[in-house]
Image (cartoon, grey):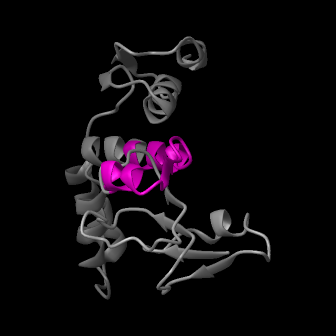
């Protein structure tokens, strides 16, 4: 079975396919398509195409109605990359509360200077910031990602306020 990938898809996910599948970056008549972010709204589907898989949450880049008319099943993988997204969110929280990037850029300007250690000691105070512990984080949407962010923020000592009118029982149980 020929599977067309429209974006670079993680090798970790692709290794789940056994040898009966041909994973291809180009194919005129694929039976399956895997897409991440590429827009498929102008895509001309082959009569051979049976399914489109979105490697991620949402299907806004896939013409779902057009696929339904042609009998093509569309599905996504919500939560599959939720830990990676949680890590990026936490990174953003820390980077925005501390002047990490500015400090790195400044430290690079010290390279080759004789009194580098003294300059670093003198200037490092310019790159402080605020601790996130004790701060309040509001999260709108407590799906796979929101729950992980809420729990990680709580572990870091933040006060977390969440809102999700569609929170599932399983989601509520997963919240610390």
Picture coordinates of residue 131 (x, y %)?
A: 34, 33
- The one nearer the camera, 148 or 56, is 56
Occupied quadrant, residue 101: bottom left
16 magenta-colored? no
**Left or right: where 98 falls relative to 20:** left
Occupied quadrant, residue 171: top right
Picture coordinates of residue 124 (x, y %)?
A: 28, 56
Q: Residue at x 25, y 45 (%)?
A: 96
85 magenta-colored? yes
Quadrant of the image containing the C terminus: top right
**Left or right: where 56 falls relative to 15:** left
Picture coordinates of residue 1 (x, y %)?
A: 68, 75
Q: Residue at x 56, y 47 (%)?
A: 80
- The one nearer the camera, 7 or 173, is 7
Observer able to see residue 122: no
- The one nearer the camera, 58 or 83, is 58
112 versus 101 height, above or below:
below
The number of callouts visible is 0
Task: Read off the magenta span.
Answer: 62-89
Picture coordinates of residue 18 (x, y %)?
A: 79, 70
């Amino acid at each position: 079975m020929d599977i067309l990938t429209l974006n670079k898809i993680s090798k970790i996910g692709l290794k789940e396919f056994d040898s009966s599948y041909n994973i291809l970056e180009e194919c005129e008549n694929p039976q399956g398509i895997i897409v991440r972010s590429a827009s498929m709204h102008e895509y001309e589907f082959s009569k051979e195409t049976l399914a489109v898989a979105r490697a991620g949450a949402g299907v806004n880049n896939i013409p779902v109605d057009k696929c339904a008319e042609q009998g093509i099943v569309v599905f996504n993988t919500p939560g599959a990359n939720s830990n990676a997204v949680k890590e990026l969110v936490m990174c953003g929280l820390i980077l925005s509360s501390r002047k990490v990037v500015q400090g790195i850029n400044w430290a690079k300007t010290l390279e080759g200077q004789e009194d580098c250690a003294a300059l670093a000691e003198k200037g490092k105070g310019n790159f402080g910031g605020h601790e996130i512990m004790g701060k309040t984080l509001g999260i709108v949407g407590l799906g796979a990602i929101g729950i992980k962010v809420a729990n990680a923020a709580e572990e870091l000592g933040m006060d977390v306020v969440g809102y999700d009118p569609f929170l599932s029982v399983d989601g509520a149980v997963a919240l610390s």
